[in-house]
Every structure is written in structure tokens, then in C-alpha cells.
Amino acid sequence: MGKMTIRQKLKWLLLLPVIVFLYAAANYGLQYLVILPSFASLENDQAKKNIERCQDTIQGEINHLKLIAGDWSLWDDTYRFVQDRNPEYIESNFHWNSLESASGINLIYVVSLQGKVIWGEAYDSSRNGKISMAEFPETVFPKDHYLLKQGKKSKDHSGILITDKGPIFITSQPILKSSGKGSPMGVLIMGRFIKKEMIKDLIEKTRVNFSLKDLTHDPVTSEERDIAARLNTAPFEIDIQNDNLLHVYSILRDIKGAPALLLRAEVNRAIMKKGKTAALFVSVSVLISVTLIAAFIAGIMNTHIINIRKRTSLIESIVDERTRELQVAKEEAVQSKIAAEKATKSKSEFLANMSHEIRTPLNVVIGMAEVVMKTAGDDRQRMMLDTINREARSLLGILNRILDFSKIEAGKLEPECIPFNFRVMIDDLMKSIAFHAKQKGLDFSFHLSPDIPSLITGDPGLIRQILMNLAGNSIKFTSTGSICIQGELLEKHE
């Protein structure tokens, strides 16, 4: 495995923030959008259940007081006592030591329908016995007193009452015969102070640590007043204290429906602790998952990089091999070029030597033929000598053409461009061609268009050689018959 390049390291460094961001987003989403809200909802449900348990327990105490008062109010002895006020009833029933210790009763009032107090006392051993209370007159209640209204209608009226001596559970029951029939004779009022000992007993029953605060007489903080104000429109309110504890509040209204007591329950945040533990576990799981995914991606990328390097190495080896082959081919081409140049040079030297060796005797033949022609005795001899001279000159032209081909291969041949008499050259050439055709038994004719001028510009030797090759091939490949060469003017340039 090769080392990572700087560019690859930079790519990984740029990828790290993306991975961190994805982890943070996933972690935040799972914790604060899924897990913790779910546990917070469970925590709120638990807090609501705890405060409702406290409310139910307090209401249970009020109901218990109603049962006790009901036994007293639905009794013939009490019914007669309102009528005759016999002292035996007082001596038999109104014993505060037993009433307070056995039933927790702190207040009993027997009132006629007109509001006159038949008998009435409030007792609290923690306050040294009998006590007077402004809310309970000693002789006469107003006829429209709220504790008498329901009793006159043969209905009970129970709840919480805030007094100058503290909050008290209170119940007002109509006094009827034991049969429950007939009109009420009066109203029995019975009460029980809400003391710390009672709260302690209720805490043991509910297993919820709660407290009650008198909104009228107890010192109340501004925060608690704000909470009480909000509880006018909400059944309960939760106030988180710290990671371990929260307070849940509710309002207990008095017998007249006004806010009386602020109920506060303490709730241990065990559920949220478990939620945070679960969120932490999920965070670690997400981190491990992201790490594994990143490692997997890194492994794939690393494998891909290794494969690319292998392919690159293979390509480089192939290129090196091809380079060596091309170098060898180049060297072979250079050697071939050198050999060709040597061969060309040898050929040129050979042609030069051959030209020299052949030109010398040809020039002698041509010269001697011309000399003999001047002294020839008859026409036949002159014609034969003329043929010898013409063929020798033709051979000399062929030799020149061979040298020209050599120049063409060497790229040194340039056609001549000189004025010459085309018709004279053609007449001379046709005589030589006619001689060769006659020797093979062929008829030969030549027709030159009159449009062709006599004097033209070009390469006479090259033109002669072309026509000679054309006629020679015709004679060579024609066994019988005739050969006719015609010349036409195709285009004229001034």
C-alpha cells in the first residue's frame, strides 16, 4: 500500500467536517427531536399522575370528614338535640380529646335553620385547647351564610376553608332523622385543621413529597404568585429545578371556588435520567456507526486508489515497453535509412560510372556514323548509317532517362522548360519507331493535328521518352496488324 498524497490527505481533511456535521445533526435529531421529547412526555405524565394522586388523597380526607359528619347529622339524637338542646347529648358526644385523637375533628357547630348556634366550639390541642375563629360566630350565623345554604336544601357542602387560624377541611351537612326522611332541622358543621402531621401522613400514603401553601396568610414569593396566576387557566404547571428534581404545581380552591392553597409536589427525575442515559447510548451508537461507515468508505476508497495505482503501474510498464519497441524501431529505421542512403549512393556511383563507360563508345559510334554518312556512296548506305546514328542517339537518350530516374528518386530532377521544334522531334522519332515496327512486320502510321504548333516550350527529352515508351510498348505487345499514333491539341497556353 502506497503512502497517501497531500491531495488525498486534504480530501480526507475536508471530509472530516462533513462527517462531524452529519454526526452532530443525527445526534441532535435523535436526542432532542425523538428520544428526550419522548422521555420528557413520560416525565410530564408521571408528574401529572403524582399531583393528581395528591389531589385525590386530599379529596379523600374531605370525603372521610363528610362520612363522619354524615353519621352525626343523620341521627335522631342530633335531630332532637336541635329541638330540646338536652345536656345529655353534649355530655355523651362532645369530648374533644377523643374527637381530635380518634377522628382528627377540630371544629363542631350545630346551627338551627335560622342561623342560631345551638352548640359550637373549635378545639386545637396544639393551641392549648378551645380557640375562637372569626369565621365562626359564637351565637348567630347570617341567614345567607354559605355554610347554611346547602344545608337548608338538604344538601351537603364540603371543601377547604381559609381561616385566621389556618386552612381547614370543612363540611356542612343537613340535620335529618336517622331515616333520612323529612325536612332538615338544622345544619351540622364539622371541620379539621390541615396540619403538618396530616400532610406527613398523606405523604406516606401517596409516597409523593408535597406541600401546601396558604395563598392568603403564608409568605408567597413572586414566582409562586406568577405560578398561581397561570394556574387559573391550566390544571397544573411543571417547574424544572435541576437534573434530579422538578416541581409540579396545582391550585386547591376553597369551598367558595376561590384559589386557596398552592399544592406543590416534588418529582424525582428518574425517567429523564434514563432518557439521557438512552440518549447517550444512542449518541455512542451513532458515533460508532458513523465511524464504521467512514472506515468502510475509507476502505473502499483506499482499495479503489490501490487498483488505480496498479492500473497506472501496468499502463506505465506497457508505455515503457512500447517506448523501448519504438526506440528499437527508430534505431532500425535509422539503420535502414543509412543502408538506403548507402545503396542510393552506390547506385548513383554505379550509374555515373555506367554513364561514363557507355557514353564514350556511344559518342564514338555517333561520331563515326556521321563521318561515314558524309562519304557514303549510295542512299542505302546513308539510310542505314542514319538509322545507326538515330538509334545510338536514342540509346543515349535512354541513358539520360535512367540518370533522370535516379535523380527523381533522389528528389533532384527538375523538368526542363525550353523552346524546341516539336514537329522536327516527332519526325525524327517516328522514323526510329517505324523502323522497329517494320522489323516486326507491323504497319505503322502517325498523324499529327495541324493545330499543333511547331515551336513549343517544354522538356523535349522527357516528351521524347514518353512517346518512345508508348510506341515501344505498342510494338512489344502487338503481334499482327498496325499501329497508329495520333496527336491532338487539347489546350493552348500563350
Image: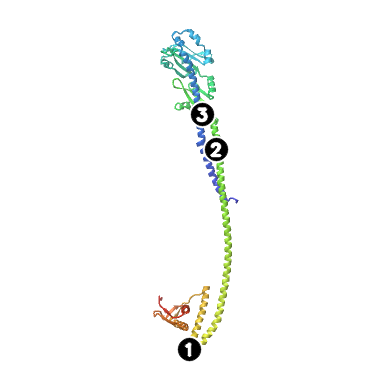
User: Looking at the image, can residue 323 be seen?
Assistant: yes
Q: Mark 1 Cα within 10 Å, few/some/many (few <14, many 20+)? A: some
Element at label 2 = helix
Picture coordinates of residue 294 (x, y %)?
55, 45
Residues at marks 3 and 2, CA–CA distance in whole angstroms:
24 Å
- Disc 3 marks which amino acid? Gln
Q: Which residue is drawn at 57% across and 75% down?
A: 346
Q: Is disc 3 in contact with disc 2, using a CB cutoff of under 8 Å? A: no
Q: Mark 2 Cα within 10 Å, few/some/many (few <14, many 20+)? A: some
Element at label 1 = helix
Element at label 3 = helix
Q: Mark 3 Cα within 10 Å, few/some/many (few <14, many 20+)? A: some
Picture coordinates of residue 324 (x, y %)?
59, 62
- Disc 2 marks which amino acid? Val
Q: In the figure, 115 relative to 432: above or below?
A: above
| Residue placed furthest toward the bottom | 377
Choose between 75 and 11: the one closer to the eye: 75
Pointer 1 or 3: first along the chain: 3
- Check residue 382 in the rendering and tell me which mark sits there, or answer none: 1
Picture coordinates of residue 444 (x, y %)?
44, 82
Q: In which quarter of the image is the C terminus?
A: bottom left
Choose between 211 and 158: the one closer to the eye: 158
Left or right for 441, reference 281:
left
Pointer 3 or 2: first along the chain: 3
Location of residue 289 (image quadrant): top right
Pointer 1 or 2: first along the chain: 2
Residue hosting label 2? 282
Residues at marks 1 and 2, CA–CA distance in whole angstroms:
128 Å
- Disc 1 marks which amino acid? Arg
- Check residue 46 in the rendering and tell me which mark sits there, or answer none: 3
